[in-house]
Amino acid sequence: MRGGLSYEMIKVDAKDGIAGKCDLCQGNPSCIASFDPTAVVGMGLLYATASTGANHSFGGWSLGSDYLFNNRKIISIIIGIIGAAVAILLSFSTPSTPLWMISRLSIFFGLTGMGWNAVWLTLVGEISFKVKGSAGLGLGLFRFIICVGGVLGSSLFLV
């Protein structure tokens, strides 16, 4: 027994590998036991693709802000515009959207939605040091706002 659900409770169809009804949910499609294992692998690959984009963007956006634009505010606006465009394009995706398109969008999501914080943390530190003389106070306040936004923003999806 693991986490209150025993392995014997989940019945797996050997023909196509998709889990069927368990004794707890009686076939509710939102139950954890009714997932498609191939979909989980696909989601993991897309997450890995987005993470790869994010890992490349940490250095890339910083180099761009220092050497190409010499301005962190401009690069932050560019990141925001690209990220908004990716979010809009992803919102129109359907189950029939080709995987190659979703994987390309996940790379750009990683570049923007996951990789924005390196430039932003530097920008916040520089601005708060100039204004208040304390980069730590500005960065702490920034992290607090981000965390509150994550809690309050995600609760909007429950409605």
Image: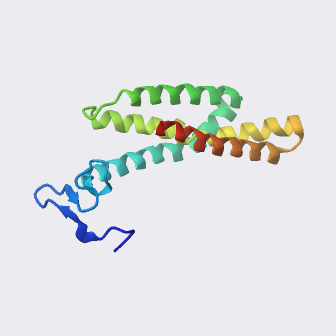
**Residue 26: x, y in percent?**
23, 55
Query: Which residue is outermost to the bottom?
Result: 1
**Residue 28: x, y in percent?**
26, 50
- Is 154 placed above or below 70 here? below
Write the residue at 69% across / 31% down.
72
Question: Is 59 in front, or is 43?
Answer: 43
Write the residue at 86% across / 44% down.
134
Picture quadrant where residue 20 is located: bottom left
Please state if 113 lies on the left or on the right of 63 as rendered: left
Please count the marks in the image.
0
Picture quadrant where residue 14 is located: bottom left
Display colour scheme: rainbow
Write the residue at 63% across / 29% down.
75
Name the quadrant of the N terminus: bottom left
**Residue 100: x, y in percent?**
30, 36
**Residue 133: x, y in percent?**
89, 41
Question: Is 83 in front, or is 29?
Answer: 29
Query: Which residue is outermost to the left?
Result: 15
Please state if 62 lies on the left or on the right of 52 as rendered: right
Question: Is 138 in front, or is 111?
Answer: 138
- Is 48 placed above or below 149 here? below
- Is 142 placed above or below 64 here? below
| Residue 140 seen by the camera | yes
| Residue 118 seen by the camera | no
Please state if 137 lies on the left or on the right of 40 as rendered: right
Write the residue at 49% across / 41% down.
110
